[in-house]
Image (spheres, helix red, strand yellow):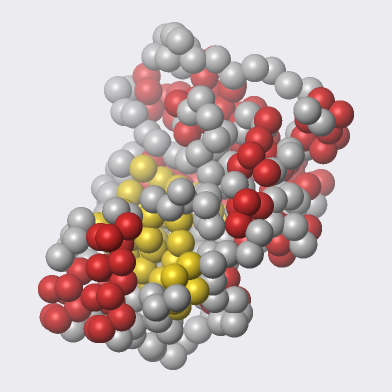
Amino acid sequence: MLKYLIILLDDTSVSYCHYENRKTERRLISLDDLKAGIVFAMKQNLTVQFVYPNYELPNEYKTAIETIDHTKICPASLKEENADVLCVENLKNIDANQNEILVCKISKEELFNSYEKLIPVLENVNRLNIVISDIDKFSETDFSTYKDILGKLVEKIKKQYANGRISQINILTDRILLDRMNNCNAGAESITFAPDGKFYVCPAFYFEDGNESVGNLTEGINIKNSQLYRLEYAPLCRKCDAFQCKRCVWLNRKTTHEINTPSHEQCVTAHLERNASRELLLELQRYFPDREIEKIDYLDPFEVRDKYKN
């Protein structure tokens, strides 16, 4: 059941997930389509998320946006006063003084070489989401490096708790609080409305190939094999307890050619995060006395797939 409508306001709208937006030419959604998309959300009782480009919108667009409750996802460089989520695409321009929800999208190389720059950020932001843009290119050596970095971040967060500072970082603290999958759920709980006036499973499907529309405002939404986007039709994921994993369906298709089957790289990184969260929880147990993360002896559920058969 759909819960969210993501409205891309321009072809240059900021990327906040694994996909790359290589479009450089501005293409602002038409005002009529924007208003129609808002009406669609109202009729379907959907929560709206507006994704902004790196320039100020015309006043009539601002007025239309304010006609519905929403979340603003903006590039940090836009300096949008009422932004709910700020996005940065490299550590070079990250501002440690920002105190909003911050999405930091970076490559594995930048994370491995410059993760220390995240430390002062954790002192100020209310929430930090780390998105690794090339997670599909992780090697076995990269897994080891990522595990070490997670361990160092665990130590930092532990010290913050001791000093009365509660930090949220998606790759470590989310799993402590979750008791079920909290994935992206594109195509199942969210749908994207693009500047061309058509619906797409998520922004990635629009930016990668504009021919992958799943409907429009006139004909409605029609996702082929829509059940495959739901968790219950994902044999490995539905029994997995790496609850913080994004379970990115676009990344699934890109790496395994199956919407409901994640790659080895996506599974292993998610389980490294899960295990680091377990270590953090053991250190912070007095803050979370009723929480528990079971110890496991694998990193990829495919390795123990026999237990997932039923």
The answer to whether residue 125 is left or right of residue 221 is left
Residue depicted at x 77% and y 35%: 301
Residue 86 sits in quarter: bottom left
- Quadrant in the picture for the C terminus: top right
Q: Tell me residue 109's x, y (percent).
A: 65, 59
Q: Tell me residue 22's x, y (percent).
A: 54, 80
Query: Please, which residue is most extreme toward the bottom here?
Result: 25
- Front residue of 128 and 159: 128
- Front residue of 88 and 216: 216
Up-down: is 293 above or below 276? above
Q: Tell me residue 19's x, y (percent).
A: 57, 66
- Front residue of 84 and 4: 4
Residue depicted at x 64% and y 39%: 232
The answer to whether residue 32 is left or right of residue 151 is left
Residue 154 seen in the figure: no
Residue 210 sits in quarter: bottom right
Up-down: is 111 above or below 73? above
Q: Tell me residue 133's x, y (percent).
A: 59, 61
Residue 272 sits in quarter: top right
The answer to whether residue 263 is left or right of residue 228 is right
Residue 144 seen in the figure: yes
Residue depicted at x 31% and y 28%: 165
Residue depicted at x 29% and y 53%: 45
Up-down: is 144 above or below 177? below
- Front residue of 245 and 223: 223
